[in-house]
Image: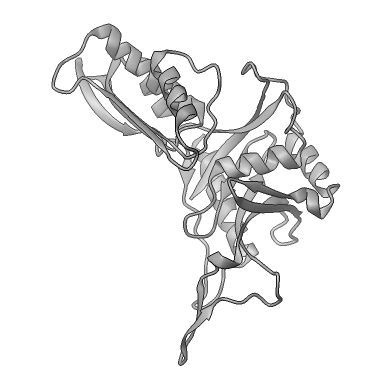
Amino acid sequence: MVRFYEPLIRNQQGQRQTISGEFWKEARKDINDLAEADRNHTYRGVRYYGENRDPVSPATPYIYVGRLRPAADHPDGFRPGSGILGPLQPAQVGDLISEPTLVLPFGTTNYVAVMSPVTGGTRIQAIEYWLNMALGFFPTDNTLTLAPLFDKKMTDKLANSTGATRVQVRVAPGRDLPENLPGRLMRAVRASSQVTPSDLSVEMTWSFGHASGSQPSRVELLEAAREIWTGGWAESAEVNLEVQRDDKIKTEIHQLINDRLTYTAKFDVPEGQSPTEQSVLKGMQDAIKQFRGEH
């Protein structure tokens, strides 16, 4: 799954800062200038290592961020005819297995396509953290976030809706929420996340149950859904949205995170082999073409 983001820089008050139109070009140069140790950072107990890649075919420069699996987390190896061989042993003692994420800038904007061509993949929060460390935003007054790009149809529905009857939101373990979240419901989410152990997720649901609910409360739920939609910090979210269809108010259920812009990258993987860099990048390029054609 290829997801699309735009880099944003905010100060401690949540105000957006001016960002260069050459952001990714400058970021790649800064990463190139780093010593190896300065590309190795730990997020929530897991090490990540990143570097620039400049493939020749296709000629699409990108940033590689790998999740380094500790030796204790290595899977078992298997050999046809022999069975299970025990823990997978890298080529040299001390080597680790890296689960890759590709950060691929494209076009004349600062838009970027992000994909992990492995099962599960890396959370975008870990990529954000690594970029903040590698590019020197931590510790400063500014923070880099990767804001997801949105489906215009869903944005229009949220803008034109008269209210919502139910909102559910889930925050990933250890996720830091912005200080200036608007509204009582969003402040409640942030307060709960601050007092929750860092290895636990936070999940909250607001609903009228079988009651119809007051119009002010339905509007308050709608405002919460809009904030979750644009905030980029929720792991998952669902809203029962009131929309007008055929001169009647109907209720539609939407998975807010899933309704963001995502496209499937397809790439060939020969039986018994790992996907090549070329095939993965080609799949991402095809997803980018689809994105451009529809937006």
In the displayed structure, does residue 230 sit left or right of residue 238? right
In the displayed orientation, state which residue is furthest to the bottom: 81
Q: Residue at x 79, y 52 (%)?
A: 37
Vertical comparison of 255 with 178: above or below: below
| Residue 95 image position (x, y, % from top left) | 69, 69
Vertical comparison of 161 with 153: above or below: above
Residue 203, picture quadrant: top left
Q: Residue at x 54, y 50 (%)?
A: 122
In the displayed structure, does residue 27 sit left or right of residue 122? right
Query: Quick one: 152 or 140, which is closer to the camera?
Result: 140
Query: Quick one: 58 or 255, which is closer to the camera?
Result: 255
Vertical comparison of 269 with 105: above or below: below
Q: Residue at x 67, y 34 (%)?
A: 110
| Residue 105 image position (x, y, % from top left) | 67, 43
In the displayed orientation, state which residue is furthest to the left: 210
Q: Residue at x 14, y 17 (%)?
A: 211
Query: Quick one: 276 or 31, which is closer to the camera?
Result: 31
Tell me, yes or no, if residue 246 can be seen here. no
